[in-house]
Amino acid sequence: MHYTIEVTGLTFSYPDGHRALNGVDLRIAPGEKVALVGPNGAGKSTLMLHLNGILNGGAGEVRVCGLPVKAENLGRVRAAVGLVFQDPDDQLFSATVYEDVAFGPLHMGLPEAEVRRRVEAALAAVGMSAYAARVPHHLSVGEKKRIAIATVLSMDPEILVLDEPSAGLDPRARRGLIRLLCELPQTMLVASHDLRLVAEVFPRTVIMDQGRIVADGPTPVLLTDVALLNAHGLEPV
Amino acid sequence: MLHFDLADHYQRGSSRIHRLDPRIKVIGAFLFILVATLLPFGAWPSYALLFVATLFIAQLSGLGAGYALKRSFIVLPFALAAITLPLTVPGETLAQWGALTVSVEGTVRFVSILVKSWVSVQIAILLAVTTAFPDLLWALRELRVPRPLVGIVAFMYRYLFVLADESLRLRRAREARSAAGTGRAGGSLLWRGKVAGGMVGNLAVRAFERSERIYNAMLARGFRGELLTLTPPAMTDSDRTMLVGWVTFLAMATLIGFVFAR
C-alpha cells in the first residue's frame, strides 16, 4: 500500500538536549484528513518540520509519497508536502501577496506561464483573488491565514500540513477556514488545539504527548474518551 | 489591534506619473539628483528650472504642487552642515562682525548646496509617494542593483512593520503596568534604563527567532539560496518617450547651468 506519509520509529533531540520526539510511528493514506492534537511541547511542530526535511538527523525514517526524506529527495519532498506555519507573518515574507504565492512554484523551477496560472488558481481556491496586489502587512489575520494556505496550494502538494490554522481567528474567519478545509481535496495533517474544529473537519485524530503518539483512531471515539483527553491535558468538547 | 504605519508614504493614484514604469522613475530620479549635484555653484537659472520641474511633476501626479514642497523642509537641518562655508571660503566681503567675515563666494556656495539638496529631496519624495514599494523593489532588481541588497531592503520593508507592531505591544504592556502608587512613581533613572534595555533585548531576540522561522518557511517552499522572481511587465513606448523627454530637459538644464554659471 502506498502511504502519503509514513513515519517509522522517529526520534529527535534538539541541540540543547531536549528530546522532542520519542519513537513516533504514523501512517497517513492518500486522501485522509487527520488532526494532530496534544498539549504544547508534545512534539507536534517538531514532527511537522520533519515531514519536509527541515529538521532531520534523529533516528527512524520518514517517507513522503514513497520517497525517503533525504538530501537528494528534498526538492520533490518539499513539492509534495505543503507546510503552513502557525504565524502567517512568518509564512508571508514577500512584498506582495502575488509574489508570495508565486514563491513556491518559482523555486520549483516551473515555467513562468505555469507559475502565473497556479498563483491565480491557488488564490481563487482560498477566495483571495482580489488580494493579489496587496501588501501582507495590511491584511487581517484571517486573510493572512487564507493566503498562507494559498502559498503552498500553488505548489500543488499532495498533502497539506498546517500548524494551528485557527489560532487567533475571530468566529467568522474561523468558520470560513473550516469551510475551506472541508472543501480542499488534499490529504491533510493539521495540528490544532481547537477540538471543535477537529470534530467538524477530521474523521481521524492522532493524540501526541511527550514526543509519542498516545492514541490514534476515529475522531468521534477519541474525543468522547474523557479519561484519555484529561490524561493528556485536553478538554472534552 | 495595534498597527504601525511608519514610513509608508505611498499615495494611491492613477495619474500619468503613478502609471509610469517604475524603472523609468528610478532612473529619472537618479539622473535628476546627479544633475543637481554636478551643477556648478550659483547656476541660478538651472536651479530654477529643476525647481519648476519638481512642481510640474507634483502637479502631474495629482498630489498638488505643494505636496513635496511641504515635506521637503526636513532637509534644512542637514544642510546646516554647510553653514560654515560663508565664513571660511575666502573672497569678496559681504558683511563683517568683529573677526567673522562673511564672503560672497561662501554665501553663494552655501545657498547653492541648500537649493540643490532641497530639490533633490523633493524629487526623491515624489518618487516614493507615486511608486508602491514592491514596484520600486523590482525596478531596482531590473536595474541590476545586486540582488542580495534588494533582498535585504525587501525583507526590511516587510518586517519593519511587524517588528514595530511588536515593540508597540511591548510598550503598551509596560504602560499598562506603570501604575502610580503612593510612593514616588517612575522609578530611578537606572531602573528605567534597565527596563528599556530589557525591552530592546527582548525585541532583538524575537527578531532573531522570527528570522529562523522565516528561513524555515522559505526552505519549506523550495528555497535553495537564490531568490527567484517573475519577469516584470515590459516597458511601453510612452514610458520610453517620457524618459527621453526627461533626459532632454535635464541635459538642457545642465547646459544652461554651465553656460550661465557665475
Image: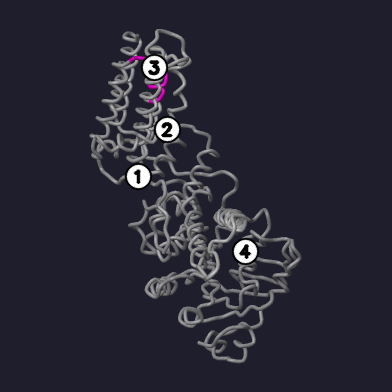
| 10 Å crowding of disc 3: few (<14), some (14-19), many (20+) | many
Q: Which residue is mark 3?
A: B107
Work out whether residue A149 or residue B129 is closer to the camera in this orientation and state it: B129
| SS at badge 1 | loop
**Type of amino acid at the residue the image marks with label 2:** Pro
Q: Which residue is mark 2?
A: B77
Residue B239, image x, y percentages: 30, 31
Label 3, label 1: how many angstroms apart (C-alpha)? 36 Å
Give the residue displayed 39% in from the left and 42% down from the top: B135
**Side of A75 where B44 appears, left or right:** left
Q: Which residue is mark 4?
A: A49
Nearer the observer, disc 3 or disc 1? 3
Query: Where is A143 relative to A22, above or below?
Result: above
**Within the magenta stretch, is there residue B38?**
yes
Position of the N terminus of chain B by quadrant: bottom left
C-beta proximity under 8 Å, tags 2 and 3: no
Q: Which residue is mark 1?
A: B10
| SS at badge 4 | helix
**Type of amino acid at the residue the image marks with label 3:** Thr
Give whichever of discs 2 and 3 has the lower sequence position. 2
| SS at badge 3 | helix
Please give the chain letter of the residue carrying mark 4.
A
Q: Which quarter of the figure has residue B18?
A: top left
Give whichever of discs 2 and 1 has the lower sequence position. 1
**3 and 1 marks on the same chain:** yes
Give whichever of discs 3 and 1 has the lower sequence position. 1
Segment colored magenta = B33-43
Looking at the image, can residue B42 be seen? Answer: yes
Residue A111, image x, y percentages: 47, 46
Q: Which quarter of the figure has residue B70?
A: top left
Give the residue displayed 55% in from the left and 72% down from the top: A189
Residue B259, image x, y percentages: 33, 8
